[in-house]
Image (cartoon, rainbow, N blue to C red):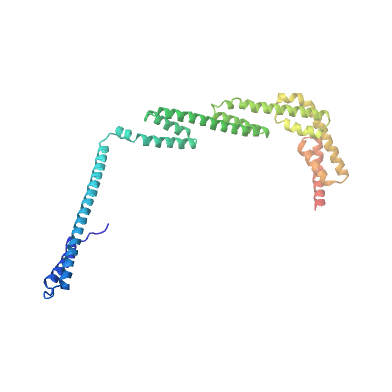
């Protein structure tokens, strides 16, 4: 804002030229009909008083305009003060009514944020607030439908992912982990229809695989594929109870006997051929698989010398 000059300074700026003009008129040379000083004095008076009149009118108009703006500003301030005073005297309920639209928009945005974060429980709390406190029941019902739909879709996707993990454990035949995962899914998503019978699903898969092992073992034993039958027998032993193993005992004894005989014959051949490295490997296999047999005792009596000879060849 430009600083105003003092009033006396404005008046002085007019009085001084006017006085000078008067002095020129009074002291002009009267002997000549046309005196230059007198003429200049008259012209100066005319110009000074014309400018003074213009300044006076402009100054008056400016003061009137400034006064009008000041009055308007004072009226605005008074109106705002009166508005704030009236708000201060309102009750909480009355102020809530005045801010209803703004609070509704804020509440809707908060619900949208909770839905986007999949925090459905928090969103439902705000939806209840929207309906009960503010009365926007139609908006609240729309949000409830959206939340229910998205919650179902989100949960269903999580259940499907969990079941896919369970199927992976079944394929890997990790039965203990599969049973634990089935129980976990049931605890996490008890309301989902997909979790029904998951334990039975694991049990059925395990039973199917056990039946396949039994079939393959009997087939390998019948075809005298001793190595395959022995590998299957080791794995089948993890699935069969005492009672379930009873029908296979005789076949298993035959397979084990043949395997022992085959290993014994192979051990003798390697020793006779002085193939010490292979003899040491087969000897260790006999001791590991048939530790309580007479053959294993015989191999133990020879194995140290065979290992030394195998080490000498390797060195």
How many marks overall? 0
Please indicate, yes or no, whether residue 257 appears anywhere in the rendered image. Answer: yes
Q: Nearer the viewer, residue 59 or 150?
A: 59
Q: In the rendered view, does 248 fall on the left or right side of 4?
A: right
State the image coordinates of residue 205 (x, y, percent, origin top left).
67, 28
Q: Quadrant of the N terminus?
A: bottom left
Indicate whether 57 appears above or below 303. Answer: below
Q: Residue placed farthest to the right in the image?
A: 272
Q: In the rendered view, does 50 fall on the left or right side of 97?
A: left
Q: In the rendered view, does 189 fall on the left or right side of 169?
A: left
State the image coordinates of residue 199 (x, y, percent, origin top left).
62, 27
State the image coordinates of residue 94 (x, y, percent, origin top left).
29, 33
**The image quarter in which residue 22 lies:** bottom left
Q: In the rendered view, does 173 fall on the left or right side of 33?
A: right
Please indicate, yes or no, whether residue 240 appears anywhere in the rendered image. Answer: no
Residue found at x 62% / y 30%: 179
State the image coordinates of residue 24 (x, y, percent, origin top left).
14, 71
């Amino acid at each position: 804002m430009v600083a105003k000059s003092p009033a006396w300074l404005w008046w002085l700026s007019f009085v001084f030229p006017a006085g000078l003009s008067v002095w020129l008129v009074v002291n002009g040379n009267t002997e000549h009909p046309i005196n230059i000083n007198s003429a200049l004095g008259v012209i100066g008076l005319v110009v000074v008083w014309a400018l003074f009149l213009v300044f006076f009118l402009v100054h008056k108009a400016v003061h009137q305009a400034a006064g009008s703006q000041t009055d308007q500003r004072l009226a605005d301030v008074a109106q705002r003060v009166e508005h704030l005073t009236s708000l201060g005297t309102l009750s909480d309920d009355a102020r809530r009514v005045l801010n209803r639209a703004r609070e509704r928009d804020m509440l809707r945005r908060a619900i949208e944020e909770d839905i986007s974060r999949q925090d459905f429980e928090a969103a439902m709390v705000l939806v209840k607030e929207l309906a009960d406190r503010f009365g926007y029941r139609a908006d609240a019902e729309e949000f409830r439908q959206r939340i229910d739909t998205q919650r179902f879709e989100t949960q269903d996707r999580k259940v499907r992912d969990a079941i896919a993990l369970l199927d992976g454990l079944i394929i890997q035949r990790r039965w203990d982990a599969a049973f634990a995962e089935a129980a976990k899914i049931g605890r996490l998503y008890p309301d989902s229809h997909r979790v029904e019978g998951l334990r039975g699903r694991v049990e059925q898969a395990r039973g199917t695989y056990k039946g396949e092992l039994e079939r393959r073992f009997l087939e390998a034993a019948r075809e005298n594929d001793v190595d395959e039958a022995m590998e299957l027998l080791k794995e089948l032993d993890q699935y069969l109870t005492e009672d379930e193993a009873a029908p296979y005992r005789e076949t298993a004894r035959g397979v084990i006997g043949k395997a022992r005989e085959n290993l014994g014959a192979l051990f003798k051949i390697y020793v006779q051929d002085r193939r010490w490295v292979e003899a040491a490997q087969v000897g260790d296999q006999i001791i590991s698989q048939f530790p309580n047999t007479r053959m294993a005792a015989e191999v133990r009596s020879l194995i140290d010398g065979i290992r030394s000879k195998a080490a000498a060849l390797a060195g």
